[in-house]
Amino acid sequence: MTPNKNHCIPEQFVFEQVKSCPIVVNFKGKPVISDAGLTLIAELDRKREIISRLTACFKDYREPNKILHPVQSLIAQRVYALVMGYEDINDHETLRNDPIFALAVGKAINSSEESVTLAGKSTLNRIEHCPENVDSRADSRYHRIDHDPKAIETLLVEFFLESYLKPPREITIDLDVTDDLTHGNQEESFYNPYYKGYCYAPLYLFCGKHLLAAKLRASNSDPAGGALEELQRVIKQIRARWPKVKILVRGDSAYAREEIMAWCESEVGIDYVFGLAQNSRLLQLIQPTQHRASQEYLQKLQPVTSFLETLLTPSEELKKQAAALVKNSVWYCSLDYQTTDSWSRSRRVVSKIEYSREEVKTRFVVTSLSTKNVPPGRLYTEKYCPRGNMENSLKEQKLDLKSDRTSTHTFAGNQLRLWFSSIAYILMNAFREKCLAQTELKNATVGTIRTKLLKLGAIISFNSQRVLIAITCACPYIDIFATAYNYLSRLPKFA
């Protein structure tokens, strides 16, 4: 029950202890904040101008003389909140009174008694909510802030290009899809039997830990739907800046499609490696290699089994123990393969056969890379398997930055939420690369960095000369904070 404001609240609360003096609690302490590390993120943003350039993708139709919260302040407040772990727009009803967020978005505060005026949930909702019955934001009464989707998509790739001091010789672009579960009547929300729920199926493009694209899609669409168009758009922008860069496109079997592979083959300097679902023809083609793998395994297993049988009574359990001491036999082979009707040409398929006592595991990938340049073993282990690192970036997006918080009604509004989460990821990845490269947090997840370096309690005080944020001297990560600050202070401003 919410207490009535007219009720008398005591000045202090006394808790009696059996073996100690009474404990007295009151609410007369100095203002304490819990997000003091946000000062690092805000400073990085000011130098790299990430939020300000995102703001340029928005159009504000509000009357200038009636604006209390500029668009840049609204976007910064929303993105910084995601960085600090506040996933819901309702959280801003409390954050609007937080002095550290006010300072981060550029609000002037001169005294501790001065009220902090940040946007609440209703004001922020006017950016994210995109009602389907509003054709023009300029004519709308309440939703008068519009955004340019193409400009935001272009900006995500631009941030990636700026992360390099000079053009790289080769890059790898990973494609993958994940699920964003929905729990209401969101537009374009459908039941997906693979994910066992109503959801969206956003498409992501990453290059290493750099996010290139985040495209929200309905979950009843083809897993590879729109992938070729996104690839073409992203690669065109990359090639405009880096015309000679070699590009490897990588993905699982969902993207081993004729149109994607044929396009990569038609372009100079673009190769691909995709997972390939097994079938009876492929399994038949690898039988000779599978036989050799089995022979090698038995040759390794037989001496171990014979030795153990001289010491112990022969049994099935003994054979299992012997198998546990022997490494599996792993063989790779290249095949010249073409489907009966879906592929326009014959392509190189690489197979991995892993033979053990219990089972035979087979995996296939299809690639445009030649055997001469990349042997089968290297292609599978060095070119294809590292795509698993993209899963870590997707987990950071979903678990740490709540990219699946797509709970507004309209599809366009949920796409905007996904982009806000993407910008929050770009901010944190830039912080990790630019400021934490020489620390123990250089490979830490967003959640770990937030817990150890951003979620810091501090006392904040104001006077006419400065704003003082006093973090406790017992903070165990003072050295990392200092290192991050030193790198940040030397970081040049975006030109």
Image: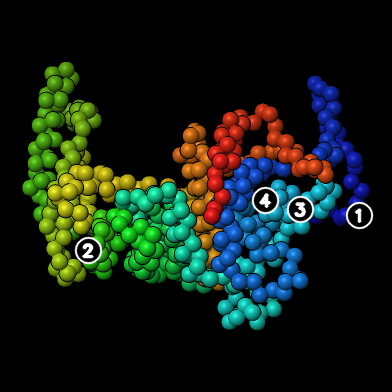
Instruction: Write down the residue under mark 1.
Output: 6
Which of the pair 455/360 is nearer the observer?
455
Q: Which of marks 1 and 4 is nearer the N terminus?
A: 1
Where in the figure is residue 99, as x and y percent of width and height?
Answer: 74, 49
| Amino acid residing under circle 4 | Ala
Q: Distance between the residues labelled 2 and 3?
A: 56 Å
- Characterize the local packing of mark 1: few (<14), some (14-19) or many (20 or more) Cα atoms within 10 angstroms: few
Q: How is the image coloured?
A: rainbow
Of the residues shown, which amino acid type is indicated by label 2?
A: Glu
**Can see residue 87?**
no
Q: Please tell me which of labels 1 and 2 falls first in the chain.
A: 1
Q: Which of marks 3 and 1 is nearer the N terminus?
A: 1
Distance (Cα) linking label 3 and label 1: 32 Å
Q: Is residue 347 visible?
A: yes
Q: Which residue is drawn at 55% across and 67% down?
A: 57
Q: In this view, does 22 lie above or below 424?
A: above
Q: Is mark 2 on a helix, strand or loop?
A: helix
Q: What is the secondary structure assignment of the residue under circle 1?
A: loop
Dot 2 alpha-carbon crowd within 10 angstroms: few under 14, some 14 to 19, many 20 or more: some
Assess whether mark 4 and mark 1 are in contact (beta carbons under 8 angstroms).
Answer: no
Q: Circle 4: is it few (<14), some (14-19), or many (20+) Cα within 10 Å?
A: many
Reading the image, the residue beneath label 2 is: 265
Residue marked by disc 4: 104
Residue 492 locus on image (x, y percent):
55, 47
> Toward which corner of the image does residue 224 lie, by quadrant?
bottom left
Q: SS at mark 4?
A: helix
Q: How many labels does the image show?
A: 4
Specify the label residue 108 is tagged with. Answer: 3
131 or 165: nearer the eye?
Answer: 165
Mark 2 vs 3, N-terminal side? 3
Dividing the image into 4 quarters, which one contains the C terminus? bottom right
